[in-house]
Image (cartoon, rainbow, N blue to C red):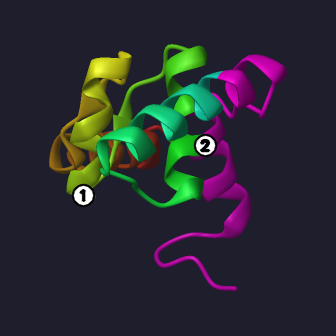
Amino acid sequence: MEVIDGDIEYAKIILEDLFKIPYISNDVIKLASKIYSQLCRRGELIPSPDVIVASICIVNEIPLATYDQHFKRLINFELKLRNSIQVISELKRRQDSNKLGD
């Protein structure tokens, strides 16, 4: 696997610096079950993996940057969304500032 304009280790360092990598906990599963159940009752299901992703973000108080519009249905469950374009711009700025420091 090739990383454009860099190597895998450099990309890994940048991502680890920018993002907390959470895991699925019992609290996440409980919340995902609650969300799934309520969406099912309303006839507004979204893909199950997306329910898990949203639940991880909510439990760990991590905002989600995505282009998928169906995540907006989960704002009522306290999901915080970030503008994906702003996140990409931030990543590019950080990458550029790290290259200047080399």
Mark 1, Cα crowd under 10 Å, few <14 / some 14-19 / many 20+, is: few
Left/right placement of residue 98 relative to residue 11 reads left
Q: Is residue 49 a member of the stretch shown in magenta?
A: no
Q: Which mark is residue 78?
A: none
- Tell me the residue that label 1 is attached to: 67
Going by the numbered disc 2, the residue's amino acid type is Ile
Q: Is residue 17 a member of the stretch shown in magenta?
A: yes
Residue 66 percent across, percent down from the top left: 31, 51
Proximity of marks 1 and 2: CB atoms separated by less than 8 Å: no
Viewer can see residue 81: yes
Tell me the distance, in whole angstroms, between the alpha carbons under discs 1 and 2.
17 Å
Going 27% across and 31% down the picture, which residue do you hit?
A: 81
Residue 39 percent across, percent down from the top left: 39, 41
- Write down the region rendered in magenta: 1-30
Left/right placement of residue 8 relative to residue 39 reads right
Q: Earlier in the sequence, mark 1 or mark 2?
A: 2
Residue 67 percent across, percent down from the top left: 24, 57
Mark 2, Cα crowd under 10 Å, few <14 / some 14-19 / many 20+, is: some
Foreground label between 1 and 2? 2
Viewer can see residue 97: no
Residue 51 percent across, percent down from the top left: 52, 44
Q: Determine which quarter of the picture holds residue 93.
A: top left
Q: Nearer the viewer, residue 82 or 102?
A: 82
Q: Secondary structure at mark 2?
A: helix
Q: Nearer the viewer, residue 36 or 9?
A: 36
Going by the numbered disc 1, the residue's amino acid type is Tyr
Going 40% across and 48% down the picture, which residue do you hit?
A: 95
Q: Nearer the viewer, residue 45 or 11?
A: 45
Q: Determine which quarter of the picture holds residue 73.
A: top left
- Tell me the residue that label 2 is attached to: 52
Going 37% across and 20% down the picture, which residue do you hit?
A: 77
- Seen from this angle, which residue lies furthest right? 26
